[in-house]
Image (tube, rainbow, N blue to C red):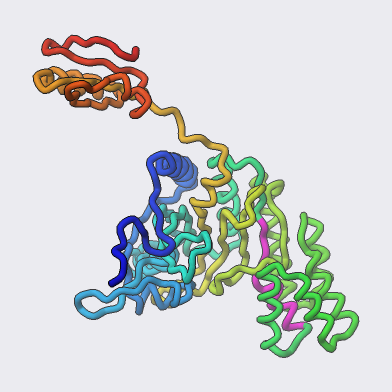
Amino acid sequence: MSKPLVFEKPLGMRDILPESLAKQRHLEQALKNCIEKWGYEEIMTPSLEYFDTVGAASATLTDRMFKLLDKQGHTVVLRPDMTTPIARVVSSLYKDMPFPIRLFYQANLFRAQEKEAGRNAEFYQTGVELIGEASVDADAEAIALAIGCLQAANIGTFKLAIGHVDFLDGLLEEIIPEESIHERFRRFLHDRDYVGYRQLVNTMELSEVNRHRLHALLHLRGGKGKIDEARELTINGKARKAVQTIATLWEALEAYGVTEYVLLDFNLISGLNYYTGVVFEGYAADLGSPLVSGGRYDNLLAQFGRPAPATGFAIKMDRLMQVTQTAQGVKPDRVMIGYTANQRNAAVIESQRLRKEGKVVIAQLLTAGDELSRYETEQGCSVIYQVDEEGQHESSGE
């Protein structure tokens, strides 16, 4: 017989204790205040969605979804992302709402883990979706808002790396006819395995010009000057158009005054395959994983019957908690009122009066031999006193 699970939790699940949760809620409120100023409205979708609709359309791999059967025998999933459910809403409940539509969310998501590796199976995100706008200005808005969110969260040093999925795809198409090789290049770049990338380039039969172009790709990371370098590597095709989009985007970001936070990265590869244009990731100092990820996904809504361009981003709250310099905020004073059984009425009246004044009040029944003063450290109360039957009190901690 297996040992009963008493204190254990399912793989990847965790408890969030009051102090950490208070800090998370404080950050969520700061992000909410920032996003709402840009005209976005908050939305919430169900934790459970049908696999055949949201699950099948999601960019999350199927084997990372939590699947269940409802009483009717339908397969449902715990939502692995929020972008796909929002696409469902925009194509159904909002089918008559004109574009563009600006929505944001703060929600918990679920992705199964195969083994314990420091990754949470349930995690929290704050995200933004700008739907129905295909212009570069929409991409610039999403990026500028992401930067504003990181500033609102008081992240000291950070950069947003910006790329375009068509640049790498277009460059590879120009140089290497075999599509089967393209995925190997993408994997090396996604994993930042530049040694493997160079070895693959050197083993291929290429002209010296094309070999140089592939090696030069690794150096297309930096400021505005990288735009001209990228343009020189391309022919007038998909990759060249991607460079022009990035050039126009940079001009828009200059108008927002945020280019000091931006790093162009023409070999940026996203782990999600539904991005169709500009992509970006946000990094903070001393944190190797991205805080923010986002980009343009123009094909998703067509799967729900309402084709529309879209862009957006998601902020990983767990990672944000690790690097923010924002404290929880000033806690209100906690008042402890001790009382015995025959003092209950007076204690309740006094507690209600103080709560109406905005104070946090803990009313504690005292038993024989109970030391009221011990609650000063145990409950974090700055003021402690005991009431008598007439409502008068004797201070023990003021």
Q: Is residue 119 left or right of residue 204?
A: left
User: Where residue 339 appears, x then y in whole percent?
Assistant: 18, 20
Whether 237 is drawn above or below 259: the answer is below
Examine the rendered structure and indicate whether residue 346 appears above or below residue 210: above
Instruction: Provide residue 121's location: percent of width, then percent of height.
Output: 43, 63
Q: What residue is rendered at 58% in x and 72% in y?
A: 276
- Residue stretch in magenta: 161-174
Q: Is residue 150 left or right of residue 196?
A: left
The answer to whether residue 321 of the structure is visible from this angle is yes
Q: In this view of the protein, which residue sits in the foreground, 231 or 368?
A: 368
Residue 5 magenta-drawn? no
Residue 88 quadrant: bottom left
Rendered residue at 85%/79% (across/down): 211
Residue toward you, 139 or 118: 118
Q: Residue at x 57, y 54 (%)?
A: 291
171 and 49: which is toward the camera: 49
* Residue under the image location 48 percent in, 47 percent down: 35
